[in-house]
Structures are given as structure tokens and as C-alpha cells.
Amino acid sequence: MGTGRVLTDARDLVADLGKWSRLGMHVKRWILLLVIACTGISLGIAFILVQLYRTQPFPEWVFYVTLQPVDRTWRALLFLTIGILGVGVAVVQLNRSLLLAVQPPYAQGRLVDLVYNYRLPQRRPRIVAFAGHRGFVALQTHRDRFGEKLLGIASIGDGLLPLGLDEPLVRSATDRMIRPLDEVLEVCAELEHGTILTGAPAIRSRRGGVPIKRVFLTAVGQDPQSVIGGTTGLVTHTDAPVRVEAIHAIREADVIIFGPGSFYLSILPNLLLDEVAEAIRASKARKVLIANLMTEPGQTDLFDVGDYVRALHAYGGFTLDYVLVNSASADRVISERYAASLATPVVADSDRDVGGSRDTVGLGGGHTLKKIGVEDNTVILAADLATRMAERVPTPHGSRDATPGAPTTMSIVVYRHDPAKLASALATLLGVS
């Protein structure tokens, strides 16, 4: 473990030096000027000291402080090393202090990456998304505004595509969805009082009652008790073999997005796969959660942003970098409809202590991205991400709207993530112009 960490740090150092040495960084010229200036200052101080040493008497201890007993060559190398290290540390710490004072609070990148991306923007980030079907479509609609390529990892519980299909979306030949497994697994949920729900339909059909304690995976037909019976922890992972394509996509990603989508069916199930969770933990990609607009009755009742952050950490073993949460308030019609179904908004807590000033960055069109807090080392950002729209849904059996010979669907007003607003917020967050 120690050797691997040393090798990783060495590779990172070489990569950083490669970035600093690229033409167009506008850094090397100023480093050269700094070296020349320091050399001039050192020579001036040396001439003064030599003159004083030859013309003025010094106490005996000066003989030892100036390392006179040491060979002159070694003395020069020692002082040169100390001076270079001192200048290097001072420059780095000075830049950090200045950056903390002027950069937006959510911009937590390293100095070399910030300068490199500003001076030499090579490409837009490659993005992997763990999201529901509607959420993935919302991300993909304006993906060109914030990313080079978008790959979706189909959920085991509430997949982005039926088993057997692995096709690019119509809008882009590069954006597509990947099945993580070749075998079929079922998502099960254990409630707080011990009842077990088997399969996504059973979980999705809940509208309230006892909270979900945990979700886990089983093979089709396998007894759920045989999976969780001998476990002591809350989360039970599975070592089912994951497709190489899915692992490669995670490893190559610059950004990993979780959501929008059903939390217990679209996002968490894939984190129960050992190889997927390990690949995400090992990835240096920025990890972003797009919080749902509303809680899901019977699943995430009364969840706040912190509950989502802690659950992802518990299931995946990693820490999110950012959470994007909607800051816009729903109108009366939307609020009443969702309240009737026992869903509540996942809102930004404007009273949360952010440990400093609340930074606001314009997104265009009158929208803003605002830092509102930090939860378990995760920066929480709020923006207007939602819109109301009409959707056609099946007419409930026995409804007054269900008349013989009439269409079997009805139109309702729903609250959804606005693709354009979502793209603007992600572009600002990821530094894509």
C-alpha cells in the first residue's frame, strides 16, 4: 500500500511538472525572473557579508553558524537547497492564500489545474452519470454546453435501458448508456421493522409507512434473507462481475454525476457492486450529486440534502465534491399536487452556516449559482434548476376522467429539472465556457 502511494504521488508530480512546462502557461518567464532576482539579491547580500567578514571582528560563534568547518562546496549546496525549498514553499503558500481570497468558494481545484485549464483549455470534461431515465435525458439534451461526452451507467434497479440494448442516443453518437452487468440482479429493500420488499416494482409502489432501512441486491429467485442474514453492517455489497466497458468509463471520467433519478432505484443499486464502488473511490474525477426536486413517497420521505450526502458516502465509501440543489419555489398548483402524494421539496437551507460569505455567480438569463453550505466536506450549491411542464400519464382506474372510449391517459402538471438550466449550472460549476 505504501509503495503504491509513493508511485502514485511520483506520477502526479511528473504530470504536474509536465503541465507547468507546457508552452503558453505564462508561468516559466516569471519563474525565471524570480530566479534572476533572487540570485541578484543573494549576490548583493554575499558581497556585503564578505566585506564585513574581512574588515570587522565577529564573535567566535559566527564561525560555526556560517559552517566554516564544512567544505565550501558542501556549504554552497546546503544553502542553495535550503533557499530553493524556502522560495518554493513561500510561493506555493502565497498563491494559496491569494486564491482563497479571490476565487469562488466552490472552486476547490489545485493551482496547477486552475492555471492549466485557464491557459490551455484542451477539451471539455468526459462525464459519467448514474441517473434515472428522465434525468439522463435532461443531462444529455444540452450536454454540449458542459461536457465532451456523456455516458450513463444503467441502473440495476430502475435501468436506463432494457437488458440487451446498448445503443447511442439519437442526439449524439458519443452519448450512450452502458449496462454494468451481463447477469440479472434484483433490488430488495429492508424496512426498519424487518419487512423485506423484493424487486423494483414493490419498492416503487410504496406511498408511505415504515422507512427503508437499506437496499441490497439478490440473484433472481434467491432468498433475500440468505444475503443479509449473516451481515453485521448496514450495506451489503456484491462481487458480481462488472462489464469492463463500465469500469473503463468510470476510470476515464473527469466528472461523475449522481442523479437526477430515483435514489433507491436509480442511484444506490450500482454502488452495491464492489467493482463499481471501488472504481469510483479510486477516481480523481469530481463527484457531483444533482439532488432530486422532490422526495419520493415511501422511499426518501423527509430527506434533506445531508441525508442524501451521508447515504452516498455509506453505500459508496466516497465523499462528494458538490451537491446541486434547486433553489426555486414551486407554484401553488405544483405544491398542492405533490403534497397530495406526500412528496415534499428537497430545498436549499438558506440558514445553513457556510463558514464565510455566500458566493453568487451568474449563470445568465437571471439565474445564479450560490454556495449555501458544507455538509460532510461536500460543498452545497443552489440554483434555479426546475420548470413546470405537462405530462401524459395513465388514467387511474375508476377515475372520474376515465370514460368509455376515451383515451387511457390524462395530462397533469409536473415539476422537472429544466435541461437548459441544469446545463448552465453544470457549465459554471465545471468551469466550461
Image (tube, rainbow, N blue to C red):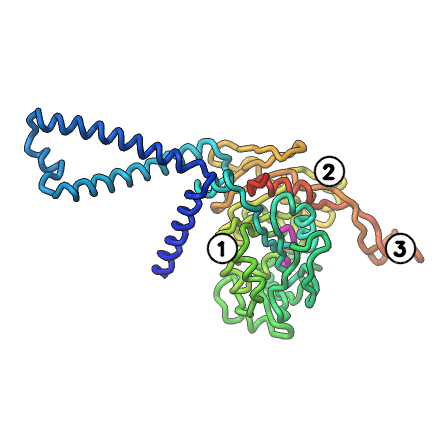
Is disc 3 placed on a helix, strand or loop? loop
Q: Residues within 10 Å of mark 2 (few under 14, many from 20)?
A: few
- Going 65% across and 33% down the picture, which residue do you hit? 364
Quick check: marks 3 and 1 in contact, CB under 8 Å?
Answer: no
**Residue 265: within the magenta?**
yes
Horizontal and vertical percent position of residue 113: 47, 43
Residue 193 visible in the snapshot: no
> What percent of the width, then of the height, locates residue 94?
37, 34
* Mark closest to the chain's N terminus, 2 or 3: 2
Q: Residue at x 12, y 26 (%)?
A: 52
Question: Which of the two labelled residues, at mark 2 and mark 1, occupies the earlier sequence position?
Answer: 1
Is 203 displayed left or right of 237 in the figure? right
Q: Is residue 243 visible?
A: yes
Q: CA distance from mark 2 to mark 1?
A: 40 Å
Say whether disc 3 or disc 1 marks the residue closer to the N-terminus: 1
Determine whether 317 is above or below 40 in the image.
below
Identified by mark 2, the residue type is Asp
Kindly state the secondary structure of the residue where label 1 is placed.
Answer: loop
| Residue at 64% from the left image edge and 65% from the top image edge | 197
Say which mark, if any, is on residue 407.
Answer: 3
Which quarter of the rendering shows the C terminus? top right
Closer to the eye: label 3 or 1: 1
In front of the other: 73 or 255: 73
- Front residue of 29 and 111: 29
**Amino acid on which disc 1 is placed:** Ser
Q: Residue 283, which numbered label? A: 1
